Image (tube, helix red, strand yellow):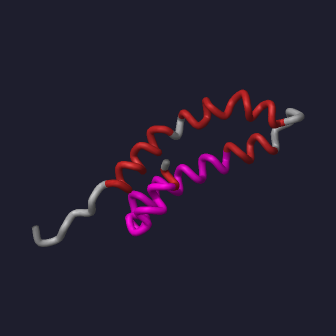
Amino acid sequence: AVPAVAALRFRRLRSPEVAFLGLLSAASLAADALIFVFSGLQPYTAHVASALDRLILHLVPVAVLLLGHLLAEPPRSGV
């Protein structure tokens, strides 16, 4: 849902808060992926299948905040 909303609300990605939350989510997913690839378990795909849902669960609060920032209307000046 986050990539679809981000594509529709592309201008909101320029906001520092939104950019930070997006980069935080992407960095966390990239770090998790690298840990799995370089782990000693072979094949690592079984390790991913057993742990991915628990790791993604940690990103849910960040994703909710990101969606909220993407869907929020920016404040109007002079109102």
Q: In which quarter of the image is the C terminus?
A: bottom left
Q: Is residue 26 magenta?
A: yes
Percent position (x, y) of residue 72?
30, 55
The structure residue drawn at horizontal position 27% and vertical position 59%, both measured from the top left corner, is 73
Percent position (x, y) of residue 10?
44, 66
Q: Is residue 50 above or below residue 65?
A: above
The structure residue drawn at horizontal position 46% and vertical position 59%, both measured from the top left corner, is 6
The structure residue drawn at horizontal position 22% and vertical position 63%, both measured from the top left corner, is 75
In the image, the segment drawn in magenta is 4-31
Q: Is residue 21 magenta?
A: yes
Q: How many labels does the image show?
A: 0
In terms of image quadrants, where is residue 78? bottom left
- Along the horizontal axis of the image, is 63 left or right of 76? right
Residue in front for this viewpoint, 77 or 4: 4
- Along the horizontal axis of the image, is 48 left or right of 66? right
- Along the horizontal axis of the image, is 28 left or right of 68? right
Q: In this view, does 36 lie above or below 54?
A: below
In terms of image quadrants, where is residue 12? bottom left
- Identify the residue at the far right of this view: 42
The structure residue drawn at horizontal position 40% and vertical position 69%, both measured from the top left corner, is 11
Main SS type for the magenta part? helix
- Along the horizontal axis of the image, is 30 left or right of 45? left
Percent position (x, y) of residue 74?
27, 63
